[in-house]
Image (cartoon, grey):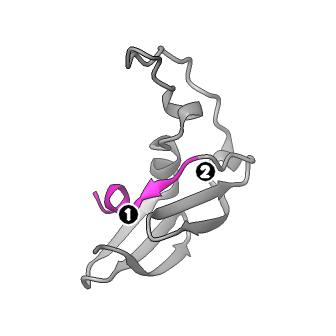
Amino acid sequence: MLFPKNLQLISQELAIAWNDGTESYIALEALRRACPCAVCQGEPDALGRTPNLAPKPLGPASFELSRWELVGNYGLQPHWKDGHSSGIFAWGRLRD
């Protein structure tokens, strides 16, 4: 099972050392823009259609992490300085 051994914030990147010996470096802006939550990506209706959403205005605080939480053995929940924190990134998604 893939999981991180260590997570560090290095400048404007999240550095992840994985249990298989590899490392990932993810730009915070890219991480925020890829937020998988329903607020950012839209929530499908009963027929599976996702409405077209107007892009959310993002400012400098949108790309700064205040902290993060590990969600069980599942993934990472970033908390951004603009108050957004509803996205959870599964380990496989972060690795990709």
Specify the farthest residue to the front: 46
Residue at 61%, 67% (x, y): give it.
69
Residue 24 image point, x, y percent: 34, 70
Most foreground residue, 78 or 59: 78
In the rendered image, the quadrant that contains the N terminus is bottom left
The answer to whether 95 is drawn above or below residue 19 in the figure is above
Question: Which amino acid type corresponds to the residue marked 1 in the rendered image?
Answer: Trp
Q: Secondary structure at mark 1?
A: helix
Quadrant where the C terminus sits is bottom left
- Please name the residue shown 53% across and 40% down the image: 37
Which class describes the residues within 10 Å of circle 2: few (<14), some (14-19), or many (20+)? some
Stretch in magenta: 87-96
In terms of sequence position, does the residue under pointer 1 or pointer 2 come before the other?
2
Q: Quadrant of residue 49?
A: top left
Q: Residue at x 52, y 56 (%)?
A: 28
* Residue at the disc numbered 2: 63
Rendering coords of residue 57 (x, y %)? 65, 29
Q: How many marks?
A: 2
Question: Where 87 falls versus 90 (above or below)?
Answer: above
Q: Position of residue 75 (x, y in %)?
A: 46, 63
For label 1, the crowd category at 10 Å Cα-Cα, with few meaning under 14, some 14 to 19 and many 20 or more, is some
Reading the image, the residue beneath label 1 is 91
Q: Position of residue 17 (x, y in %)?
A: 37, 80
Q: Give the number of the mark in front: 1 or 2.
A: 1
Label 2: element kind: helix
